[in-house]
Image (cartoon, rainbow, N blue to C red):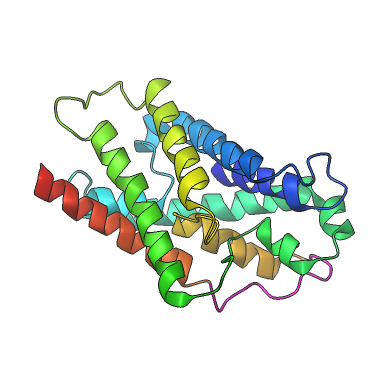
Amino acid sequence: MLILLGNGVVANVVLEKSKGENSGWIVIAFGWGMAVFIGVFMVAGISGAHINPAVTIGLAVAGTFPWASVPSYILAQFIGAFIGATLVWLHYKPHFDATKDPDLKLAAFSTSPAIPNVVFNMISEIIGTFVLVLAVLYLFEVPEKADSGAVASLSGPFAVALVVFAIGLSLGGPTGYAINPARDLGPRIMHAILPIPNKGGSGWGYAPIPVIGPIIGGALAGLLFVVLN
């Protein structure tokens, strides 16, 4: 659901002849926030709302999630990303076919930097994910605030959605704020696999940054949470 609705809003904005074409960054940022809200709300009672490997790793570093469960959770997150990206392609297929610019087609799957710079693109992804994971930890893992019903309620998912919306508005410009390895790499793999006409390359030269950066950012947030609490 995260990728279907998140990448779906990007496709709506960037692909040719879509009714949402050129509606802008605010629509994308808000759409991603709502995608997070729906994704978190739907799976909170199943997985504790783990829809992002960087969050899963950050919580494990903070000692609030078992390391033994990390590999299976990340596998599930990537499977979800594969399915979500495929559904976006099916939903917008005529628009993928009508769009001439291969960069716009790739944008509906994965992120790319506004100004390519390995060091600063990495820093951007680290900072954005750091904000996300630290906010999640303080929302749900501080003992006096944590409660078994908090994440499953509307207020918890909405709070996370607002965090992602804020990150998109304030920190998303340099790299498109992947802040989630599965969100970026999973759809990027599907972009390479799916039969999209004139799609161009899948941006593999940039691909490590939205994977490594979020993992570092999530781990740093977990470490800081341990130090402060």
The mark total stands at 0
Q: Which residues are magenta?
A: 196-206
Quarter occupied by residue 186: bottom right
Q: Main secondary structure of the magenta part?
A: loop
In the picture, which quadrant includes the N terminus? Answer: top right
For the residue pair 130 and 53, the one nearer the viewer reads as 130
The answer to whether residue 198 is magenta is yes
Residue drawn at 18 percent across, 55 percent down: 223
Q: Is residue 106 visible?
A: yes
Judge from the rendering whether residue 15 lies leftward or rightward of residue 7; answer left or right: right
- Above or below: residue 1 compared with residue 187: above
Quadrant holding the C terminus: top left
Vertical side of 176 occupied by 28: above or below: above
- Where residue 178 sits: x, y (%)? 50, 56
Left or right, 127 with respect to 33, comes to left
Q: Residue 145 location in percent, x, y?
A: 20, 25
Residue at 58 percent of width and 61 percent of height:
111
Residue name at image x 26 percent, y 23 percent: 148
State the image quarter where residue 99 is shown. Answer: bottom right
In this rendering, the answer to whether 47 lies above or below 107 is above
Image quarter of residue 107:
bottom right
In this view of the protein, can residue 153 be seen by the observer?
A: no
In the image, residue 68 lies in the stretch drawn in magenta: no
x, y percent for residue 166: 46, 40
Question: x, y (%) of residue 165?
Answer: 50, 39
